[in-house]
Image (tube, rainbow, N blue to C red):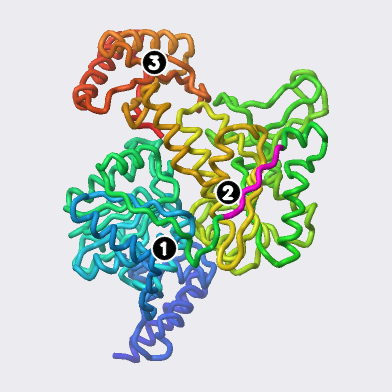
């Protein structure tokens, strides 16, 4: 019988060779890969691998399926990294300050469900977390460890894997969907992870018996999801999640948000302070530089003051590293016609376009639309188009020109499109393959580097001159966090803080790292003007393609809201960007006392919206709400 089969095979092969040589090639490759020719046990071969190894098209493959030669079936393959099953190391012992903080946190959890750990930068908060995680797992419970940025998860992953190995699962949006589904399913099984390290969406993962939630860098506004709905704040969601399981929540940061600080000092949350940096390193020396005066004297070298350049040069000579912080990506925030002042704007949004030199095009950072760079000004036909302002890409160019031997890297939204891009930039800097790291606020957050001696904040004013009641608080947090990246192991770091508003009260507060002076002033101001934490805000956004109609809608809706909420209603007003993706926007602000029943406020808002849309002329109105906006 075997001989007869072999005879049939020969006939079949001959036919293939005459009619479909490509199918024959594919079949031969399959026989080789599956081990058929060696007479061994057959191995499975995936369609993807087979096509990759033969450069055949799917049509050729389907031909063999139709002939009944190949049988195709689906099988789920595990994507979660199996390489994590390395040997784990014991946790590091805590120093006395960390030990004291650790016990104070456990003590505070006896009576309070939420505790704030206020520890200066580089005080070793992560070590304290690791001990708390270990204690929680020892009791057979699970831990959720939240971080605000994907960039941070890549660095902290290594530290946690060394201690917890395969008991740790990682979850964020740069993972493909298949891997996220797999983590989800694993969490529903008996073999679930003891610890999940993730970004804000991790609060929706299933847990069996959660014991502790850590919200690291709790002040970060990336914990708030803006678009699309549902809009939620992961820190607040985490506190609710923990209470559902009877678990505890630890909020950790060097610069707490004003709301959290208020909750901690009023006794609603526990408060533990960790005031000493690890190994008694001093906090960095912060040197303010008045760039307005330097501009006047024509002493600036582009965006750099002579002092900053001198320190950068010294750091490079001593083989130390530098971080430069600029809160704008792109090459130039705008292009301007030097003759008539025309600036290219997006056709869908009311914003100027950002010039990206690497792509040689203009991009709208709101809707992502790209444009060709104009050769002449459409307004006056002038050809003198100039770059105005400095984005990270331009800073990178300038630094390379000034320090041609230095190895420079840039970390912003444009260079970190993929999961591995983050890891490369961070690990190169960590291993000293990069001398100068230029970045947007991504570089300011919790990253630990041992050899950074100089940090440059190129322009503090872009953070301060922002029409938002949180601008002051944010600027302080950003500057304190960026400064905290300087100076590690054995020498004091230096921060060069360049600003045009040298007399601003925030400058001495940052220099002295005086968080309490900042928060005290902010709380007094917010109480006076009815802002959080004393009031809750609801932003009501109205959108429409027709601006005149939208204005009428906004006026009508504001009037209706005033009849219900009275003086608690502000607006309507134009937001800083009043048109995005061809929709015009108006904003109404609602300030509600914290002790007022929110469910009732919601009913009233929904009722007013129903009344609005019931009118025929208003049926094209789009309304959405942002409760507790960031």
Residue 174: image location, x then y, percent: 44, 54
In primary-sequence order, the first of circles 2 and 3 is 2
In primary-sequence order, the first of circles 1 and 2 is 1
Q: In the rendered structure, are the residues bearing label 1 and label 3 in contact, judged by CB atoms less than 8 Å apart?
A: no
Q: Residue at x 34, y 36 (%)?
A: 231
Single out the mark in the foreground, 1 or 3: 3
Q: Residue at x 38, y 11 (%)?
A: 553
Question: Which labelled disc corresponds to residue 570?
Answer: 3
Q: Is residue 331 above or below residue 422?
A: above
Q: Is residue 529 above or below residue 53?
A: above
Q: In the rendered structure, are the residues bearing label 1 and label 2 in contact, judged by CB atoms less than 8 Å apart?
A: no
Closer to us: 168 or 83: 168
Q: Quadrant of the N terminus?
A: bottom left
Query: Callout 2: few (<14), some (14-19), or many (20+) C-alpha neighbours within 10 Å?
Result: many
Single out the mark in the foreground, 2 or 3: 3
Tell me the residue that label 2 is attached to: 412
The kind of secondary structure element at disc 3 is strand
Closer to us: 386 or 33: 386
Report the magenta stretch's main SS: strand
For the record, the magenta segment spans 284-290
Question: Which labelled disc corresponds to residue 62?
Answer: 1
The CA distance from mark 1 to mark 2 is 44 Å
Q: Is residue 497 above or below residue 548?
A: below
**Residue 164 on the magenta segment:** no
Q: In the rendered structure, are the residues bearing label 2 and label 3 in contact, judged by CB atoms less than 8 Å apart?
A: no
**Residue 288 on the magenta segment:** yes
């Amino acid at each position: 019988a075997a001989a007869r089969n072999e005879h049939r095979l020969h006939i079949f092969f001959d036919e293939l060779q005459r009619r479909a040589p490509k199918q024959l090639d594919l079949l031969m490759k399959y026989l080789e890969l599956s081990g058929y020719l060696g007479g061994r046990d057959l191995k499975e071969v995936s369609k993807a691998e087979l096509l990759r190894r033969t450069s055949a098209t799917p049509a050729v493959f389907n031909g063999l399926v139709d002939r009944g030669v190949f049988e195709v079936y689906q099988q789920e393959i595990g994507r979660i990294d199996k390489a994590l099953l390395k040997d784990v190391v014991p946790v590091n012992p805590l120093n006395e300050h960390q030990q004291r903080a650790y016990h104070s946190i456990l003590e505070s959890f006896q009576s309070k469900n939420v505790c704030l750990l206020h520890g200066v930068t580089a005080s070793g908060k992560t070590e304290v977390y690791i001990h708390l995680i270990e204690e929680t797992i020892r009791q057979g419970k699970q831990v959720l460890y939240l971080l605000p940025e994907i960039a941070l998860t890549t660095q902290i992953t290594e530290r946690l894997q060394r201690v917890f190995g395969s008991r740790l699962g990682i979850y964020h949006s740069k993972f493909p969907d298949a891997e996220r589904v797999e983590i989800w399913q694993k969490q529903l099984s008996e073999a679930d992870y003891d610890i999940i390290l993730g970004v804000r969406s991790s609060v929706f993962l299933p847990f069996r018996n959660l014991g502790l939630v850590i919200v690291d860098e709790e002040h970060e506004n990336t914990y708030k999801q803006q678009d699309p709905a549902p809009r939620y704040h992961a820190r607040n969601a985490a506190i609710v999640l923990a209470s559902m399981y009877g678990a505890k929540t630890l909020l950790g940061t060097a610069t707490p948000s004003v709301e959290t600080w208020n909750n901690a000092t009023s006794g609603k949350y526990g408060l533990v302070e960790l005031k000493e940096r690890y190994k008694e390193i001093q906090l960095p020396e912060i040197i303010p530089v008045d760039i307005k005066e330097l501009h006047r004297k024509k002493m600036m070298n582009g965006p750099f003051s002579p002092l900053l350049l001198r320190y950068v040069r010294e750091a490079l000579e001593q083989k130390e590293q530098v971080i430069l912080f600029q809160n704008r990506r792109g090459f130039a925030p705008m292009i301007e016609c030097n003759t008539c002042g025309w600036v290219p704007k997006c056709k869908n949004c009311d914003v100027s376009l950002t010039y990206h030199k690497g792509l040689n095009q203009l991009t709208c950072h709101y809707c992502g639309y790209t444009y060709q760079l104009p050769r002449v000004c459409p307004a006056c036909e002038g050809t003198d188009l100039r770059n105005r302002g400095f984005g990270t890409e331009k800073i990178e160019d300038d630094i390379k020109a000034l320090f041609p031997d230095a190895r420079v890297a840039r970390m912003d939204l444009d260079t970190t499109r993929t999961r591995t891009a983050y890891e490369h930039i961070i690990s190169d800097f960590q291993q000293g393959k990069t001398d100068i790291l230029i970045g947007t606020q991504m570089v300011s957050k919790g990253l630990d580097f041992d050899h950074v001696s100089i940090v440059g904040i190129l322009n503090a004013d872009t953070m301060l001159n922002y029409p938002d009641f949180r601008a002051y608080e944010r600027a302080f947090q950003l500057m304190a966090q960026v400064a905290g990246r300087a100076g590690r192991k054995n020498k004091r770091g230096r921060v060069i803080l360049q600003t045009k508003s040298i007399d601003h009260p925030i400058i001495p507060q940052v220099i002295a790292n005086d968080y309490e002076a900042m928060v005290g002033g902010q709380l007094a101001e917010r109480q006076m003007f009815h802002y959080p934490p004393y009031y809750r805000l609801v932003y009501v956004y109205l959108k429409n393609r027709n601006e005149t109609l939208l204005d009428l809608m906004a006026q009508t809706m504001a009037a209706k809201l005033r009849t219900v909420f009275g003086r608690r209603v502000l607006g309507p007003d134009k937001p800083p960007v009043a048109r995005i993706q061809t929709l015009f926007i108006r904003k109404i602000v609602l300030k509600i006392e914290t002790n007022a029943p929110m469910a009732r406020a919601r009913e009233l808002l929904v009722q007013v919206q129903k009344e609005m849309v019931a009118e025929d002329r208003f049926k094209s109105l789009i309304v959405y709400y942002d409760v507790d906006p960031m």
